[in-house]
Image: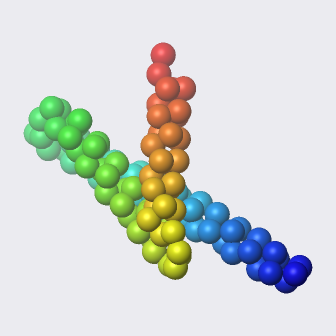
């Protein structure tokens, strides 16, 4: 009986690790894409009205990348784990932007 519970504990911690991995990938993707966009915005005559749609697109791409990689190898409940990655990403982004605003 202990072996079954130990295997479940390892599997659950592995899923948690994959969710954290997906979050890290999402945030790294966001940082890279935002840096590229900021560089383009700085050195070209691109209008600043594109900021809103581009931020939304970058957020979507980042969540998709992190969820795909983080939950891709999970055989069971992959969609649920991908949703958890997206939800945590949005919550952390909201909290960090709320804290940094005056």
In this view, the residue farthest toward the front is: 1
Task: Using residue 64 as the reference point, say whether residue 21 is left or right of it.
Answer: right
Query: In this view of the protein, can residue 32 be seen by the observer?
Result: no
Q: Nearer the viewer, residue 46 or 74?
A: 74
Q: Which residue is drawn at 39% across and 52% down?
A: 30
Seen in the picture, residue 33 relative to 69 is either above or below; the reply is above
Q: How many labels does the image show?
A: 0
Task: Using residue 50 as the reference point, say whether residue 63 is left or right of it.
Answer: right
Q: Residue at x 15, y 32 (%)?
A: 49
Seen in the picture, residue 82 relative to 43 is either above or below; the reply is below
Task: Using residue 9 as the reference point, say whether residue 17 is left or right of it.
Answer: left
Q: Percent position (x, y) of residue 16? A: 64, 63
Q: Residue at x 31, y 52 (%)?
A: 60
Q: Percent position (x, y) of residue 48? A: 17, 32
Q: Which of 90 and 102 is in front in this view?
A: 90
Task: Using residue 8 as the reference point, say whether residue 76 is left or right of it.
Answer: left
Q: Percent position (x, y) of residue 12? A: 69, 69
Query: In this view of the protein, can residue 94 be seen by the observer?
Result: yes
Residue 42 location, quadrant:
top left
Seen in the picture, residue 60 relative to 2 is either above or below; the reply is above
Residue 46 location, quadrant:
top left
């Amino acid at each position: 009986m202990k072996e079954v519970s130990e295997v479940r504990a390892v599997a659950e911690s592995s899923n948690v690790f994959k969710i954290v991995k997906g979050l890290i990938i999402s945030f790294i993707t966001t940082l890279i894409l935002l840096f590229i966009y900021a560089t383009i915005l700085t050195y070209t005559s691109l209008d600043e009205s594109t900021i809103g749609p581009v931020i939304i697109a970058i957020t979507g791409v980042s969540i998709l990348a992190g969820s795909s990689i983080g939950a891709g190898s999970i055989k069971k409940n992959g969609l649920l784990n991908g949703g958890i990655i997206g939800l945590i990403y949005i919550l952390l982004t909201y909290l960090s932007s709320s804290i940094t605003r005056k």
